[in-house]
């Protein structure tokens, strides 16, 4: 009987999937809606009675669930970085020319519309959708698989049983947004915000009510050789993934060749000389689209060349985003103030009369530097036109009307606004030369403690300001030396519970790995991705890097794929600075991890010989990569999927399907509290063996 039920579930699933393919992809339905609904209802009833037979690619996944997912965190397995920006066709052409000069062979470039939505990565295993993860911080995102399964255009099963990671954009059509109602009804100012908000609903049944769409633009496919981006897109389309209809490819003059085939006849092939015309036509076509686009993305077409170009800590070197002219509005500059950054850089900021631009209210506008102010002749009281460059960063574009009482332009102060020290000019910017400047100290410590850096719970701007004002916090290492009970006793807003939570956050941060500590020091251009590349290249400790800096051998780092000369020189200068070196030694004394142990699953440690998977969300281990690092540090192996080799599952809140799979393969289920206890035992054992 059970075998018959299982066979019927599989047959209904396959039949309904073929019906969906004919309806949504080929626009040629072969059954009536009534017949489709009858079969769909039958499958849904069987799955409710026999959930063990429900397939991952079941059409009923489109309906969504009323269960709360709480959006657990997931580590990305591919680079999910931002893009470098260009604001004119000449800047795009300059980028193309610079990139071409790095190769003896000539390159071509693909061009795509930059859809304004929410970035998503789809992970397929053996052709079946396994996970859908938001971009997050580029390294860790939120698992929104249940929500993404409700999007009709997302194939739950690919044409070929490949394992792949696919990048794309989830968006909402303009007409659908208007049909759903304005901001008073939806709570969102524009389609992009509603799409992003819907994607992060904790109940996928709510996401299913929003007609979200998907457009993919990049794929990383195991075991498949693809020569260029065009070939990649064609293969993604063959797999059943939706692409943009508006693809262009630019070739050197005299070598233009057709792209696509009869299925991609609308793709455009052109010469480099047609770049400006292509950008102009794409800009004009923006108004005719039923979806919002905020620019174009230009990419090196040849995939082998991309590998050679690599990445910076922020963006791939093989792509650039051309940003359309941004929406503008007029307002008045009420006053101009200066801010001090963690490196001492002084940045002027205009406080303007609040004005709505592109769906949000703007009241602060960066003025960059003195040259920018002089060029535009900006002064307090002026009426100005403000845009949101890249539809994100507000900027003054031009003066509309000068204030008759104002000076010709506003001048930067001669002294630091925070500590009254003298300022030093470096390039186009002014810097405070006092490393103990309270403004620098505040920003430096705020960056160190922030989420995505050392992630010290409770150490927010208010706490930092109080401790600085009381003369207790002058540099980063002071965080680990303060007596918080004495320092905050009787201070308003700091009760015993808050102080205890603060102390707990500080102690937990001592366990952060080297890959988190180094980028948290705020060295220019040095992020987690760069540190991971150092570690992979064999530079596994701060001492390795200090030795390179002392010997002026940064060129060795520059030769690492994905690092480059600028980043290597930035690190070398910082590590030769006596202030930075003293800071590092004090952090070493405080017990912070300044080296990355060689991962060896066969070595010693409390988790030696064990294979762990980490799922769900946690109170102590945020992001959960912190727990993964601790498992590796104590000899364990960490995997992203449940298989027969799994020995332990660290299960947080909202663990999802991995919990049941782990039980099915006989793995031990470990709670967060049990895991903390195991770590404490490991520490005690280490101490007793010393």
Image (cartoon, rainbow, N blue to C red):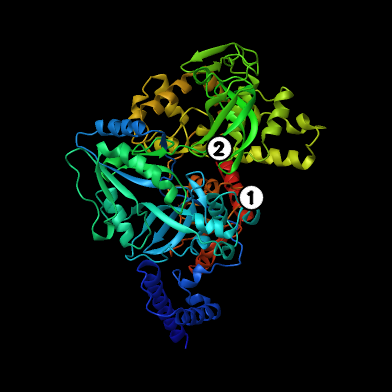
Secondary structure beneath dot 1 equals: loop
Q: Compare residues 548 and 183 and report the one nearer the observer.
A: 183
Is residue 327 in view from this perspective?
yes
Badge 2 local density, few (<14 within 10 Å), some, or many (20+)?
many
218 left or right of 72 in image:
left
556 left or right of 483 in image:
left
Q: Residue at x 49, y 18 (%)?
A: 371
Q: Determine which residue is flagged by label 1.
A: 619
Q: Which residue is farthest left?
A: 254
In the image, residue 274 sits, relative to residue 435, either above or below, namely below
Q: Which residue is farthest bottom?
A: 1
Q: Position of residue 218 (x, y in %)?
A: 36, 50
Mark 1 / mark 2, whichever is N-terminal = 2
485 left or right of 587 in image:
right
Q: Position of residue 408 (x, y in %)?
A: 57, 14
Q: Residue at x 26, y 34 (%)?
A: 100
Secondary structure beneath dot 2 equals: loop
Q: Compare residues 445 and 546 and report the one nearer the observer.
A: 445
Is residue 634 in view from this perspective?
no
Q: Determine which residue is flagged by label 2.
A: 453
Q: Position of residue 264 (x, y in %)?
A: 28, 57
Badge nearest the viewer, 1 or 2: 2
């Amino acid at each position: 009987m059970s075998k018959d039920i299982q066979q019927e579930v599989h047959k209904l699933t396959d039949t309904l999937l073929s019906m969906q393919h004919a309806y949504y992809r080929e626009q040629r339905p072969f059954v009536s809606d009534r017949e489709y609904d009858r079969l769909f209802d039958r499958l849904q009833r069987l799955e409710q009675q026999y959930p063990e037979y429900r397939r991952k690619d079941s059409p009923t996944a489109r309906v969504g669930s009323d269960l709360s997912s709480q959006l657990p965190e997931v580590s990305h397995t591919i680079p999910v970085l931002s893009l470098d920006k260009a604001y004119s066709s000449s800047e795009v052409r300059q980028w193309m020319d610079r990139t071409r000069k790095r190769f003896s062979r000539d390159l071509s470039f693909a061009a795509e519309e930059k859809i304004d939505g929410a970035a998503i990565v789809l992970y397929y295993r053996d052709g079946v959708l396994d996970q859908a993860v938001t971009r997050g911080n580029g390294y860790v995102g939120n698992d929104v698989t249940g929500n993404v399964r409700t999007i009709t255009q997302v194939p739950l099963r690919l044409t070929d049983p490949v394992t792949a990671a696919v990048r794309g954009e989830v968006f909402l059509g303009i007409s659908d947004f208007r049909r759903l109602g304005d901001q008073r009804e939806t709570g969102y100012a524009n389609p992009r915000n509603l799409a992003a908000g819907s994607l992060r609903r904790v109940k996928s049944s709510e996401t299913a009510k929003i007609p979200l769409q998907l457009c993919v633009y990049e794929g990383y496919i195991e075991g498949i050789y693809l020569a260029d981006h065009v070939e990649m897109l064609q293969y993604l389309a063959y797999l059943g993934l939706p692409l943009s209809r508006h693809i262009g490819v630019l070739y050197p003059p005299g070598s233009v060749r057709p792209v696509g085939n009869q299925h991609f006849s609308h793709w455009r092939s052109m010469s480099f000389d047609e770049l400006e015309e292509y950008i102009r036509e794409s800009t004009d076509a923006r108004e005719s689209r039923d979806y919002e686009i905020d620019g174009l993305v230009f990419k090196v077409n040849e995939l082998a060349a991309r590998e050679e170009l690599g990445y910076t800590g922020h963006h791939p070197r093989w792509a650039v985003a051309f940003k359309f002219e941004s929406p503008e509005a007029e307002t008045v500059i009420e006053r101009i103030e200066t801010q001090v950054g963690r490196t001492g850089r002084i940045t002027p900021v205009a406080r303007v009369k609040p004005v709505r631009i592109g769906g949000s209210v703007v009241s602060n506008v960066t003025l960059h530097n003195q040259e920018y102010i002089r060029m535009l002749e900006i002064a307090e009281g002026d009426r100005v036109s403000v845009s949101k460059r890249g539809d994100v960063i507000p900027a003054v574009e031009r003066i509309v009307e000068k204030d008759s009482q104002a000076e010709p332009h506003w001048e930067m102060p001669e002294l630091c606004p925070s500590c009254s020290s003298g300022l030093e000019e470096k390039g186009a910017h002014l810097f405070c030369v006092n490393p103990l400047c309270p403004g620098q100290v505040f920003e430096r410590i705020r960056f160190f403690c922030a989420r995505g850096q050392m992630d010290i719970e409770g150490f927010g701007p208010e706490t930092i300001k109080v401790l600085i004002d009381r003369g207790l916090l002058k540099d980063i290492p002071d965080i680990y030396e303060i007596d918080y009970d004495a320092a905050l006793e009787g201070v308003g807003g700091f009760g015993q519970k808050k102080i205890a939570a603060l102390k707990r956050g500080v102690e937990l941060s001592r366990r952060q790995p080297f890959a988190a500590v180094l980028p948290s020091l705020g060295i220019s251009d040095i992020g987690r991705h760069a540190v991971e590349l150092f570690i992979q290249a064999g530079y596994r400790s701060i001492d390795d890097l200090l030795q390179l800096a002392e010997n002026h051998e940064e060129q060795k780092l520059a030769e690492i794929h994905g690092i480059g000369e600028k980043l290597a020189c930035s690190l070398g200068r910082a590590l030769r600075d006596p202030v930075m070196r003293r800071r590092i030694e004090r952090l070493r004394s405080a017990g912070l991890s300044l080296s990355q142990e060689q991962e060896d699953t066969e070595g010693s440690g409390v988790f030696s010989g064990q294979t762990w998977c980490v799922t769900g969300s946690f109170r102590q281990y945020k992001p959960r990569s912190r727990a993964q690092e601790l498992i590796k540090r104590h000899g364990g192996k960490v995997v992203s999927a449940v298989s027969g080799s799994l020995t332990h599952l660290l299960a947080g809140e909202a663990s999802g399907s991995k919990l049941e799979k782990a039980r099915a393969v006989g793995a031990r289920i470990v709670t967060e509290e049990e895991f903390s206890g195991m770590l404490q035992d490991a520490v005690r054992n280490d101490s007793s063996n010393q």
